[in-house]
Image: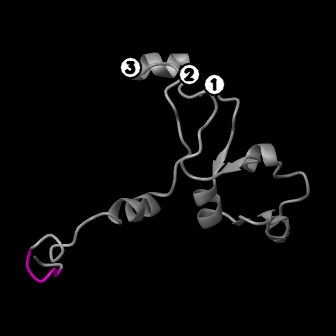
């Protein structure tokens, strides 16, 4: 993107930081570990928190598009933590038993 949108992934800030999806950043926590009122402005830690898959800006910017062999404006979506993405990806997977295989144990 053109860098004008500095969004954070809701998945990441909830699981890896101290963000409450219903209430935002826990400033009390920041203060308890020594950060004062202006030490961590939202511009630095993330003002825009978006759900995984939400569209970012105008997509891939011209210079990145050229470097990657993509069309400018190719959509870019908010990411998610790899373990969560793997969980989503495995929801449609057929277990060996469901696919007509054996007992479905891990060693098959």
At 69% from the left edge and 35% from the top edge, which residue is drawn? 5
Q: How many marks?
A: 3
Q: Quadrant of residue 67?
A: top left
Residue bearing the label numbered 3: 69
Secondary structure at numbered mark 2:
loop
Real-space Cα distance between discs 3 and 2? 12 Å
Q: Which segment is the magenta one?
A: 101-105
Q: Would residue 4 appear left or right of 85 to someone viewing this image?
A: right
How does the figure colour the protein chain or chains? one colour
**Main SS of residues in magenta:** loop
Secondary structure at numbered mark 1:
loop
User: Residue 101 at x, y = what percent?
Assistant: 9, 74
Q: Of the residues under marks 3 and 1, which one precedes in the sequence? A: 1
Residue 61 circle label: 2
Real-space Cα distance between discs 3 and 1? 17 Å
Please say if the residues under marks 2 and 1 sit with CB atoms less than 8 Å apart. Answer: yes
Secondary structure at numbered mark 3:
loop
Q: Would residue 92 appear left or right of 13 to someone viewing this image?
A: left
Residue bearing the label numbered 1: 2
The 10 Å Cα crowd at callout 2, few under 14, some 14 to 19, many 20 or more, is some
Membership of 22 in magenta stretch: no
User: Residue 102 at x, y = what percent?
Assistant: 8, 79
User: Residue 51 at x, y = what percent?
Assistant: 61, 53
Residue 18 sits above or below residue 41 on the image: below
């Amino acid at each position: 993107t053109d860098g004008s949108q500095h969004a954070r992934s809701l998945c990441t800030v909830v699981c890896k930081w101290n963000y409450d999806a219903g209430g935002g950043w826990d400033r009390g926590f920041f203060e308890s570990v020594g950060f004062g009122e202006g030490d961590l402005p939202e511009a630095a830690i993330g003002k825009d928190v978006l759900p995984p898959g939400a569209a970012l800006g105008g997509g891939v910017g011209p210079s990145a598009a050229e470097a990657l062999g993509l069309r400018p404006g190719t959509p870019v979506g908010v990411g998610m933590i790899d373990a969560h993405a793997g969980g989503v990806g495995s929801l449609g997977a057929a277990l060996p038993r469901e696919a007509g295989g054996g007992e479905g144990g891990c060693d098959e």
